[in-house]
Amino acid sequence: MFQANSHTRNKQRAEQAARAALFLMTLLMVVPLLLIVGYLFYEAWPILSFDFLITNPRNGMRAGGIWAPLLGTVYMVVISLLIATPIGVLAAVFLNEYARATWFTRVINLAVVNLAGVPSIVHALFGLGAFVLFAHLGKSIIAASLTLAIMTLPVIIASTREALASVPMPFREACWNVGATRWQTIRHVVLPNSISGILTGVILQVSRAAGETAPIMFTGAVFFKAIREGDIFAYHPFDQAMALSMHLFTISTQVPDVPKALPYGTAVVLVGTVLAVNAIAIAVRVRLRSRRKW
Amino acid sequence: MTKIVKRPGWEILAETAVEHLIRLCGVSSILFVFGIFFFVFREGSHFLFHGFRPGEFFFSQEWYPTSQSHVRYGVLALIAGTASVTVLAMALAVPFGIGAAVFVSEFCGTRAKETLKVVIELLAAIPSVVWGFIGLTVMNPLIIRWFHTPIGLNVLNGGVILALMSVPIIVSIGEDALKAVPDSYREAAIALGVTRWQLIYRVLLPAAKNGLLAAVLLGVGRAVGETMAVLMATGHAVKIPTSLMDSVRTLTATIAAELGEAPVHSDHYQVLFIIGILLFSITFAVNLTADLIVRGVRGK
């Protein structure tokens, strides 16, 4: 039999120690997520109900539910989605299918990276300067949605691009060989084969847009606005609106004497929505990846 | 005889139009980045060229934007605020983030790896306002109890929250960097009989150091630009912190807190836009550096 000498034993001990330490580090990253989400749910439990979702905040936001902010967030997210998706997908198509490896393409890539890195508050300043004041949209849902759309564009570009790049080159070559033009190839072969990645990007955009606060604070979100309960067309795109993320900020910092469960309930709805949307994105990705034929 | 089928003219026209649209969308990112700079600059430009004193702006700690007689726009304390929470956040997030990246990429089975990556993705998805809320309601009482300070909204609170927010980005990009190390490096090391830890410490980390550096820089970019979390978690004291228990105010939080009250096109309002230009420039430089480092790695 082999007998480990002291050198080998030291090596093995170092390996064990490293493994344990790194495992602990990973654990310390995962545990907070579970603790935090668990704690938020625990504190919010008494108030969570369907009524909480469909009643307006009342009594100076110290009672009632979250209908107005919830609907405002839905409006902003949907409109920003409608704006960002076509631009983002086409930009990714350009980068992956048309652009050659030139300095100009590099500049575009750099711009995408930087667009993703611009602080959210600077996006807010931009939205205020460009949409609210310069374009005379005023503080409105549409101005907030435009700001959110530009902010979340890189999310869609990145995941669409990845999806397009994973479509094998022979698919395109086969299509060109039967005489299809570039756009026909993209339209009928490349895009259908990368729909899962595009969908993932769109879903991630939704989750990002729903959670953002700073960009909408000065472009369209208001502290308080009561709307008709149960009417999903209660906002006009040129109205100002409440938003869930802004509402959480308001009732946890600006309004005194708010019952404790209220901000927790709002936070849970916000986190719950965002995490659920992300889980859907992950599920879509896993499912379509397993169905892929190449 | 072959019959040549011609496509109708409108179809060709439509196709040309679509291709032009694609090109336009392709360059849109450039337009947006320029647009952001242009419009933020435009709102702050009047004051920037009339009455703006760079010396006071960068080197004075006095931030009295609404004072009647003694108006001062010095952002040194705000820069110190941003720097203090960012440095603390990185001191916590870099070792943990890179440690976790190594663990995920080298010690995990496929299944555990997929699960951990999902958790990291979810961690990254939690909105910043919720992190701020956690800082306010969870961290604040804990800090008051553990450190016996009168207020728990301080550098420590903001730093920990920011660390939790930047860890996911460091882990996911760090993991990519480790994955990008050529297999031949690993094989050569394993053939020499190294343990896994020796492989990581002596081969992988040095080989992936540029990628890891880029991961850290992107984490810094995220921490510097973060707004809502630090607005809610760091307290509101415009001063240069001397300990972890001091409250501070960051550049981002100042804009978020004061823009609503500053009359449009007043000096105060324009100074907030100038702070925006400063933030834009900082994150631009950080992201550019990270990108150059990453490309340098790929170029090799």
Image (cartoon, rainbow, N blue to C red):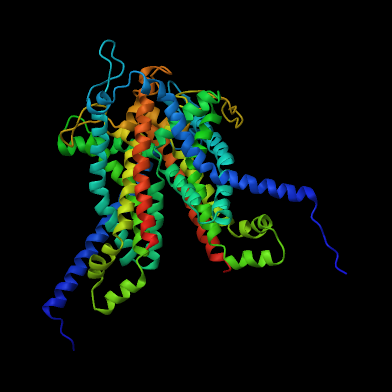
Residue B180 lies left or right of residue A133; in this view the side is: left
Q: Can residue B237 be seen in this view?
A: yes
Q: Could you say which is closer to the camera, residue B176 or residue B166? A: B176
- Direction left: furthest residue: A6
Write down the quadrant of residue A37 in the picture. top left
| Quadrant including the C terminus of chain B | bottom left
| Count of numbered circles in the view | 0
Q: Which residue is drawn at 31% across and 46% down?
A: B164
For image coordinates 50% across by 27% down, the residue present is A56
The residue sitting at 66% across, 55% down in the picture is A183
Residue drawn at (39%, 17%), measured in percent from left and top?
B266
- Is B234 in front, or is A164? A164
Q: In which quarter of the image is the N terminus of chain B?
A: bottom right
Q: Which residue lies most toward the front here?
A: A103
Camera-side residue: B106 or A191? A191
Q: Can residue A245 be seen in this view?
A: no
The image shows residue A156 at horizontal and vertical percentages of 52, 48
As drawn, the residue found furthest toward the top would be B69
User: What is the x, y in percent for residue A219?
Assistant: 48, 28
Query: Residue A33 at what x, y percent from top left?
Result: 34, 48
Up/down of B212 relative to B262, above or below: below
